[in-house]
Amino acid sequence: IVRDNSPSIPEAIERLFNDIANINRDSMAEIQDAQVEEMAVNLWNWAVTKRVGSVISEEQKAKLRHVACKLVCMCEVSTASEDAIRRQILMNMKTGKGWVDVGNAMMADGFFQAAMVGLEQLYCKLMQRASTEADITLQKSAMERDLFKVVSYQAEAAIALGDFQRASSCSLRCKDMLIRLPKMVTTSSSRKNHYYFIQSYDIGKMDKNTVGPEMLAKVLRLLATAYLDWNDREYCDKALHAVNLANKEHLNPAGIFLKMKILLKSETANEELHEAVMEILHLDMSLDFCLNVAKLLMDHEREFVGFDLMKIICERFKSSEDIGKALLLHIDMLLQRKEELLAKEKIEEIIIGHRRGRKLKPELVSCFHNILWQKAARSFEVQNYAEALNWYHYSLRFYAIDKTDLDLAKLQRNMASCYLHLKQLDKARASVREAERHDPTNIFTQFYIFKIAVLEQNSTRALRAINTLEKLITGVVPKENALRVDKDSPVTLLSLIAQFALENGQQIVARKTLEYLAQYSEDPQQVLSALKCLFRLALPKVSQMSESESRKKEMDRLLACLNKAWNLAVQCDKDPVTMREFFILSYKLSRFCPSDQVILIAQKTCLLMAAAVDLEQGRKASTTSEQTQLLNRALEEINECKHIWNILKETGNFSGDPCETLLLLYEFEVKAKMNDPLLDSFLESLWELPHLESKTFETIALLAVEKPAHYPSIALKALNRALLLYKKKQSIDAVKYSKCVRNLINLLVPDGVPSTELCPPEEIWGYFEDALSFISHTEDYPESETLWLMVKSWNIGIYMYGGKKYVSAEKWCDLSLHFLDHLGSLKRNYETQMNTLYGELVEALSKSKGSSEKSWNKAS
């Protein structure tokens, strides 16, 4: 077959197909599984890539797939990988489908069964390795899709074999899967199921002895549903015809409801819908069924028919113990359609009926309250507080008759809120008093107690409510059965309380609330806002107070805020902007404390951190104006910090503190990036400072050329200072020294081209010679850095050669060979290549010199 000898291919296919039935794994024991799989896959691929008609027929292709699939399935399945099992499932499915397509459904069935077995094996493997609920759901979804295909093919094969019972069973199974996973089905598979349903019905009609009308009706309803899903007027008519046939075969509530859906989908006139509704009522269907039909009508905006049906339902079932369902649904429908007067009539009817003994079932009572509260909430949202109270009063009236489970405290709080908006303080107070009687430890009850106290200018009662809230936050409440609340709920309320107190001039209450908010909130921004507000409130008061016990208490409160701000600043390392805000606030608070050493150190740290953040944000700034603003702000913080540092140095020995170095670096960065004309005078004093280390000068060099700054001459001078300091040490750190050398040479030779603007070529050569001299006198110089110098000097030589500077070119390349001599293990990798290249270069140089001399002689 692989030789593609066309005349003999059909004969070979037949021989393979006939022989495969007599072959098993034992008869091929000398061949490994991998070899068998390879043969099978090659055969399969050959079959699927050949165009039917020109080489093989559809039946011959089916036979080749049959052989390949049988070979693959002979291999060991128990140890097969997931991919191998998936391949077997796919091959079995496609082989079976191929047999169905050529009219041999009997042959197909075995392959479909094998595919089902493979799916079960794969499912077990997947579930064993699935680690999370999401992973399990994903794997199940993928399995369901393959299972759907196999069952669909089985249904098709059963229809072809005339096995109606099995075809119907498979079709119904497909339907159940589609309901569970609607996204799984495509238009083509939907149409395929529609074909199954038609075939199932036709077979059922031909075999009425074994198929009852109930099964026929079920198939017809499935067919009608398939038509309905196609969203086309023509198919709506076919759907209606199918469901009418179904109801004729066997009348069923599902069939009647489906007919209503079809009528609504096909935009049937109200008159026809009304006739259909009357038919339903004549069939004595249950109350629940009738209510579902009414909801269906309302969902499709057929209010005229829907409300008419609801009136009939309420009248027909008025003696039923479930009539409450109909009444509540009717009320809900009226409210949704803004028929509020009619809804209120029905509500009065329920309340009066309940008082007279026609009680709602317990499960419907909460539903009734819920309808009323939702309507009240909608009125509250549009600021119609009087109307909201009307709906809450209905709920309160019903509760007076039937004292069943109801959150009466919440109802009273909601009413209190409405009264407050209507400026009816006495009524609000009465409602809150009732709420407190039923639920005193509820945070919202305390919130309304507080609001009323503030409005009455009763600071004592307002503070009592805040203290109760604070106990709720910490879990300490006076009542044994106190309500357990989420910590975030009262904390969020504290923010609203503080705002309300400030708006109404209650500063003492506001300060206490802000202290609790800063203490318990876990939101850094919320705490920051609270502390800033506290600072603004406390500052005028403290500054106006003379030395006394009261002033000491106020100072203690400020210190508590200071500690809070400091601690939060330290914790906000992942949010530098917020961290800076806390440090600045901490610094401002500390200015009201005695200037002892501890406070000065804290102030110095706050300003240093704030400046560091502003500099970092300045580096990331998207616009020049934003960068300038940040750099100016950093400069202000640097100058303040310098002042504090000068005072702090007088209080003790701070020789190990890096503050002065950091301030120098920060100030240099600001001046360099802002192109400060005083930068040179600033540097004059800096170069002479005795305590600066090599690392400081290296940092200055980096900052001098960090955009938007561009001062390469300063960078060069700083790197020279750094190298000089390294050399002065008794024990030189070769690694640090080598990095400094690399930075200096990169500055002088950017992109392999010597920069003569900074210094003449002789000086650049001198830096390379210094590096070579240093390398020859130390064993610790990193080999990778020596290699880098070798390559760099060689490239300069090549650059010189390109510029016809032949003497310089030979000189630089010769220097590169000297660096090569100092390589260790890497020398073997480069020695031959470098010497060869050098020889070629010298030869090229000789020729170039010769050519130049000849040209000169001719010119002479």
Image (cartoon, rainbow, N blue to C red):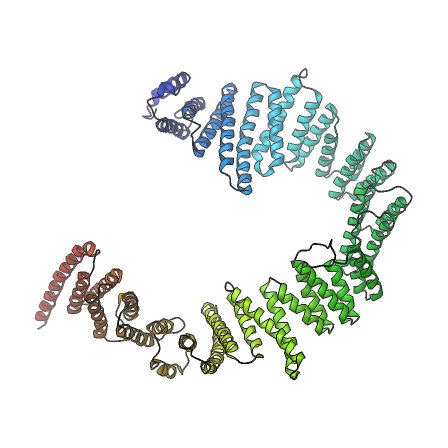
Image-based side of 644 in relation to 466, left or right:
left
Residue at screen point 66% across, 62% down: 491
Q: Is residue 103 among what the camera can see?
A: no
Residue 315 appears left or right of 798? right
Q: Is residue 257 visible?
A: yes
Image height check: is 698 above or below 107?
Answer: below
The single residue placed furthest to the right in the displayed view is 356
Could you say which is closer to the camera, residue 374 or residue 91?
374
Instruction: Count numbered badges in the picture.
Output: 0
Quadrant assignment for the N terminus: top left
* Figure quadrant of residue 708: bottom left
Residue 635: give x, y in percent of width and height.
Answer: 47, 78
Q: Is residue 566 left or right of residue 246?
A: left
In the image, residue 126 sits, relative to residue 542, either above or below, namely above
Q: Which x, y percent locates residue 197?
A: 63, 26
Where is residue 163? Give x, y as percent.
59, 19
What residue is drawn where x is 65% and y is 58%?
A: 487
Is 310 rendered above or below residue 191?
below
Q: Quadrant of the C terminus?
A: bottom left
- Image location of residue 34, percent across then percent down: 36, 29
